[in-house]
Image (cartoon, rainbow, N blue to C red):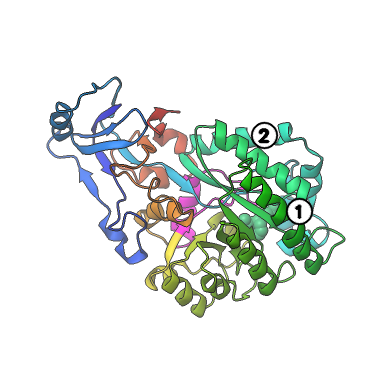
């Protein structure tokens, strides 16, 4: 496939090809239109980018290739950016929590709803009752909506089962999508997403360590499941720092990347703990301490910030400017879940700019290369570089920033979503 005549290509490359630290973000690699000259991207039949440059350069290098070009896309007047990466979602569940949105608007806090048996508990009851087929149908629909909004790689968590049977059911649903759908998926086991009704945190920790993780280990060994990360909701009144650490380390010992919820509603030193055990990423961080920022900057743990949650729950936003100044790696996620129902990364990027004071370039970095790095796959995803997957968006505008500026109107801007070289 040859995409040619584009007005602008935003490659988002970084020196190490892995991520961009905040203070390096001004140097986005623009190949700007020059005297009517356009730019091309050449993609091979395995969906890998094999050349990027001006139309002339790519055409002349093409002449030396044995295989001819079969498909062409004329991108005249368009800009091209990497496919978006959503570093944090909870997309497998049944039920509807719109009534809780009304309660929260009337003043109830997230934990008040949760402690009254709603929130995650409400969703757990319905998810346990749903069949694998039912869960897959709604999950698939959600993934297609995410992709329409430009997402080509998404992290997907379990966590509405809270027992061995339903957690493995959720992971099987995610696995099925991973094997069959044209969107990248990084899957996360989150059996410690809440303390099940009628249990204590101590009992729930034991269930995760002694029942759920051993079962998961067997399914990973038999290759029935391919799970990438382990997550815990580390929060006052849910799993404390010690319980979270035990669970995360147990996941790490079976080869999972540590990627968890921390320092969201209370400052619990989750960031310090996560950095000390080599967390790949920690999400939320509204209440991160200065020491936590330093620890994560030192170890290179990625801070995944979730502007939809801070917005919906009217929380103090995470201190992103400080994180970036201190050289932390910042990524973005939609946190799509029944509390924060938003599957569109362009909306998330808009909120990140307005509420978290990120620049548009920083938001793009955070929603591409840094998010891919948070999932440990920035060698293949997150930027337009030779050798990486051809996951990209063709935008119907010569200025890519329209994707962020036109709030909620990504449908007006995204012309094509390309996943591994195919228009999807
Ligand atoms: O990231 N904080 C915990 N988990 C989710 C919410 C899940 C839910 O409310 O269903 C989050 O916001
Ligand atoms: Fe979450």
Image point (79%, 54%), residue name:
118
- Residue 354 picture location, percent across and down: 46, 58
For the record, the magenta segment spans: 331-356
Q: Is residue 242 visible?
A: yes
- Residue 228 picture location, percent across and down: 55, 51
Q: Is mark 2 within 8 Å of ligand 1?
A: no
Judging by the rendered image, the residue that carries numbered circle 1 is 162
Q: Hey, which quadrant is residue 373 in on the image? A: bottom left
Which residue is at the far right? 198
Name above or below for residue 305 compared with residue 156. Answer: below
Element class at badge 1: loop
Image point (29%, 19%), residue name:
70
Left/right of residue 384 with respect to residue 218 in the rendered view:
left
Q: Residues within 10 Å of mark 2 (few under 14, many from 20)?
A: many
Image point (76%, 41%), residue name:
95
Judging by the rendered image, the residue that carries numbered circle 2 is 136
Name above or below for residue 99 compared with residue 259. Answer: above
Tell me which label, 1 or 2, sits earlier in the chain: 2
């Amino acid at each position: 496939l040859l995409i040619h005549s584009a007005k602008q290509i935003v490659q988002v490359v970084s020196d190490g090809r892995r991520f961009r630290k905040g203070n390096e973000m001004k140097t986005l690699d623009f190949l700007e239109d020059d005297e009517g000259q356009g730019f091309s991207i050449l993609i091979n039949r395995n969906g890998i980018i094999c050349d990027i440059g001006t139309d002339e350069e790519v055409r002349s290098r093409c002449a030396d290739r044995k295989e001819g070009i079969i498909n062409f896309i004329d991108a005249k007047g368009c800009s091209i950016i990497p496919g978006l990466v959503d570093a944090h979602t909870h997309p497998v569940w049944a039920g509807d929590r719109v009534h809780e949105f009304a309660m929260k608007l009337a003043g109830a806090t997230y934990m008040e709803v949760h402690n009254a048996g709603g929130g995650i508990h409400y969703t757990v009851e319905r998810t346990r009752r749903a069949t694998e087929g039912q869960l897959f149908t709604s999950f698939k629909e959600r993934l297609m909506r995410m992709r329409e909004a430009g997402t080509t790689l998404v992290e997907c968590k379990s966590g509405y089962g809270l027992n061995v049977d339903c957690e493995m059911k959720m992971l099987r649903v995610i696995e099925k999508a991973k094997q069959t759908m044209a969107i990248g998926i990084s899957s996360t086991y989150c059996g410690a997403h809440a303390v099940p009704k009628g249990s204590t945190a101590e009992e729930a920790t034991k269930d995760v360590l002694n029942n759920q993780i051993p079962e998961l280990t067997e399914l990973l060994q038999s290759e029935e499941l391919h799970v990438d990360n382990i997550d815990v909701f580390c929060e006052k009144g849910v799993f404390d720092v010690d319980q979270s650490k035990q669970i995360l380390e147990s996941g790490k010992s079976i080869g999972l990347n540590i990627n968890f919820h921390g320092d969201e509603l209370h400052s619990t030193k989750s960031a310090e703990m996560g950095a000390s055990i080599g967390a790949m990423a920690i999400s939320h961080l509204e209440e991160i301490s200065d020491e936590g920022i330093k620890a994560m900057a030192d170890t290179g743990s990625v801070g995944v910030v979730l502007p939809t949650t801070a917005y919906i729950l009217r929380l103090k936003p995470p201190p992103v400017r400080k994180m970036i100044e201190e050289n932390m790696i910042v990524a973005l996620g939609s946190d799509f879940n029944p509390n924060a129902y938003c599957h569109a990364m362009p909306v998330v990027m808009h909120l990140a700019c307005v509420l978290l004071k990120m620049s548009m370039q920083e938001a793009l970095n955070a929603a591409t290369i840094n998010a891919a790095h948070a999932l440990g796959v920035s060698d293949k995803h997150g930027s337009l570089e030779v050798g990486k997957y051809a996951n990209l968006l063709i935008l119907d505008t010569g200025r890519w920033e329209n994707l962020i500026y036109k709030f909620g109107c990504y449908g007006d801007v995204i012309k094509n979503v390309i996943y591994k070289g195919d228009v999807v």
